[in-house]
Image: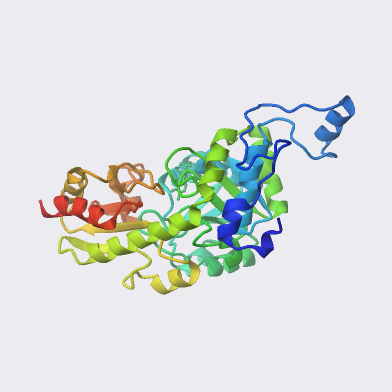
Amino acid sequence: MDNDEYDIETLAVRAGTVRSQFNEHSEAIFLTSSFMFSSAAEAAARFKGEQPGPIYARFANPTVNMMEARLAALEGAERCVAFASGMASILATVMGLMKAGEHVVASRSIFGSTVQLFSNILGRFGVETTYVSPTDPAEWRAAVKPNTRLFFVESPSNPLTEVSDIRALADIAHEAGAWLAVDNCFCSPALQKPLELGADIVIHSATKYLDGQGRVLGGAVLGSKELMEGVFTFLRTAGPTLSAFNAWVILKGMETLSLRMEAHSKNALALAQWLEAQPQVARVWYPGLPSHPQHELAMRQQKTGGGIVSFELKGGKDAAWKLIDATKLLSITANLGDTKSTITHPASTTHSRMTAEQRAAAGISDGLVRIAAGLESVADIQTDLTRGLAG
Ligand SMILES: *Cc1c(COP(=O)(O)O)cnc(C)c1O
């Protein structure tokens, strides 16, 4: 199908489908590690890359390829390379495109494991990272060095939902001869398309909204054919491969992506407005609220405010833990992007491996609570929270 002719809702359901000889309606799962050739000559041609077609499932499987083609259609990317997880995708981006002695400028407000990867692992291999404010493009410009190759940002950020100006960062990156990579996990292509805003690379934890039902881990890197060649070579050689089964789950998850993102956003906005009116709440962070510091930018750059709401309780850590422990409906888990609403205390879980100073610099206080709004009734979620707020 010609992707340019269709809207995202249509692409999410139909893009990338390749049918087998049986003409199955729903996409098939190919659980096989290798693929056969009809002759020695065909085998040789496949290995040489002269003939298209799968060889070995570490780097090519029809189910995984369908998932990649569908996600590429949604993001408007030339190519998508799938990985076993979001973290494997971030690692592959650096391993595929950079070398020792080069430099990354990254937002200070990124996923905790991403900070660990840049600082503690890639740092040991000679890739240095400077952290800057997600909301001040001038800091990015000031952090550029002659060896800067990559800008890395998450928008909105986790857990404070800070919104970065993707177009401004892309311009600064390009002036510096660097690429801008955007972790688009919080929005998904249903709400934000970073490549259209000038980014070079989009990264996904498919574990979150793309699956959308908390079942499997997966990830992806998207961009131009040229950039993805290096990322694919890392996959082919090192093997952090997405399984065919997980790819199929994500492929099916994407079919309801737009509907789910709309519903998550609606619940999150209602929850954010309600939380803002509670006397125990010091502050609410949600890009869809006019009180959010980058509200206008968010509404320009994103279709909605998304599904994540964070708020700070006046009573600090004790109040936060009490609220979490009083819930009967919400899931106490660090995951997000599920049909089930989740509640998290970032300072002691997802961001606990940061030092207290790093947390303070990122604005993650001990009274901060993050809710990923699921698809339950918002009235039921409010009732669940009222118990711990009042008690
Ligand atoms: C979860 C998450 C990741 C890591 O993804 P995994 O699939 O868990 O490896 C990366 N970035 C963001 C923003 C995330 O929320």
Residue at 82% over, 34% down = 46
Residue 300 drawn at (x, y percent)? 48, 72
* Quarter of the image where one finds residue 280: bottom left
Is any part of residue 12 visible from this angle?
A: yes
Image quadrant where residue 271 sits = bottom left
Residue 149 visible in the picture: no
Picture colour scheme: rainbow
Quarter of the picture holding the N terminus? bottom right
Residue 213 on image: x %, y %: 43, 44
* Residue 322 to residue 137: above or below: above
Q: Nearer the viewer, residue 290 or 154?
A: 290
Report which quarter residue 10 is drawn in.
bottom right
Question: Is 181 rendered above or below residue 217?
Answer: below
On the image, the x and y values in percent for residue 238 come to 64, 33
Residue occupying image coordinates x 19% and y 54%: 383
Please identify the residue farthest to the right as the structure is shown: 41
Left or right for 304, reference 78: left
Q: Residue at x 44, y 62 (%)?
A: 134
